[in-house]
């Protein structure tokens, strides 16, 4: 897909996420890695609901602004995922309500923020890591992401929101939507002793769909 089409895709999917209430105001950001090693990324203080394809930030492979508006301050977050996930071609970060709420709960396992609740959660997200709170734009968040050693495409930033990478922008968007819906399910069922997928069922999904899941997870 050419750069013009990719710019349009960022704006189309960004608007869809915004209009469905998945990231309010000027929160959230999206990036795509280009074939020359550079990126397209959404600008700082830009609403995903009203992006202009011509004003998206175009960064060089070394992170310099080539054209467009000033990029989101979350560039270090995106950089860390691209550096540790070879298959990552797109990154989406939102402030979606249920995922943010999940990131604030005291019982959350940093190695597996959600239990294996549904097949599609595992198929789209694998497992989700939780990293500690850092202020938005803090370069230290990149070190926290790098500390995951590329084992997670789906990450929760404590008291902040989810960030997900994918091999296409559409795949990253679908995954972060699945994460949000699973977080919502978890909150609805919290304290009700729900039935999760068994280890055997998880293993069957991994074998059937070629899932690579981190070693740590819920029993």
Image (cartoon, rainbow, N blue to C red):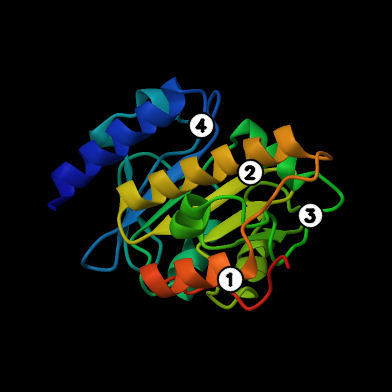
Can the viewer see residue 135 in this picture? yes
Q: Residue at the location (58% across, 71% down)?
A: 200
Q: CA distance from mark 4 to mark 2?
A: 17 Å
The residue that label 3 is drawn on is: 108
- The disc, 4 or 3, on the residue closer to the chain's N-terminal end is 4
**Structural crowding at the residue carrying mark 1, measured as other residues with C-alpha within 10 Å and reported as few (<14), some (14–19) or many (≥20):** few
The residue that label 4 is drawn on is: 45
Q: Secondary structure at mark 2?
A: strand
Q: Residue at the location (28% across, 68% down)?
A: 37
- Residue 178 coordinates in the image, percent (x, y): 49, 44
Judge by depth and name the residue closer to the eye, 174 or 121: 121
Q: CA distance from mark 3 to mark 1?
A: 23 Å
110 sits to left or right of 204: right
In which quadrant is the C terminus drawn? bottom right
Q: CA distance from mark 4 to mark 1?
A: 46 Å
Can the viewer see residue 74 in this picture? no
- Residue 212 coordinates in the image, percent (x, y): 48, 74
The residue that label 2 is drawn on is: 161
- The disc, 4 or 2, on the residue closer to the chain's N-terminal end is 4
């Amino acid at each position: 897909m050419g750069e013009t089409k990719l710019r349009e895709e960022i704006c189309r999917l960004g608007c869809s996420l915004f209009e469905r209430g998945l990231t309010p105001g000027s929160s959230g950001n999206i990036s795509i890695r280009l074939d020359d090693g550079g990126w397209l990324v959404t600008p700082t203080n830009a609403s995903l609901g009203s992006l202009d394809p011509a004003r998206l930030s175009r960064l060089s492979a070394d992170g310099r602004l080539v054209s467009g508006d000033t990029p989101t301050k979350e560039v270090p977050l995106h950089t860390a995922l691209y550096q540790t996930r070879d298959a990552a071609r797109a990154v989406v970060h939102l402030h979606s309500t249920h995922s943010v709420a999940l990131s604030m709960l005291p019982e959350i396992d940093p190695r597996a923020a959600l239990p294996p609740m549904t097949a599609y959660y595992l198929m789209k997200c694998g497992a989700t890591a939780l990293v500690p709170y850092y202020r938005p734009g803090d370069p230290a968040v990149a070190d926290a992401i790098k500390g995951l050693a590329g084992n997670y495409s789906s990450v929760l930033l404590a008291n902040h929101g989810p960030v997900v990478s994918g091999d296409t922008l559409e795949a990253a968007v679908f995954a972060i939507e699945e994460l949000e819906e699973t977080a919502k399910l978890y909150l609805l069922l919290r304290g009700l002793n729900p039935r999760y997928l068994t280890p055997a069922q998880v293993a069957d999904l991994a074998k059937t769909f070629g899932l690579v899941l981190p070693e740590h997870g819920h029993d």
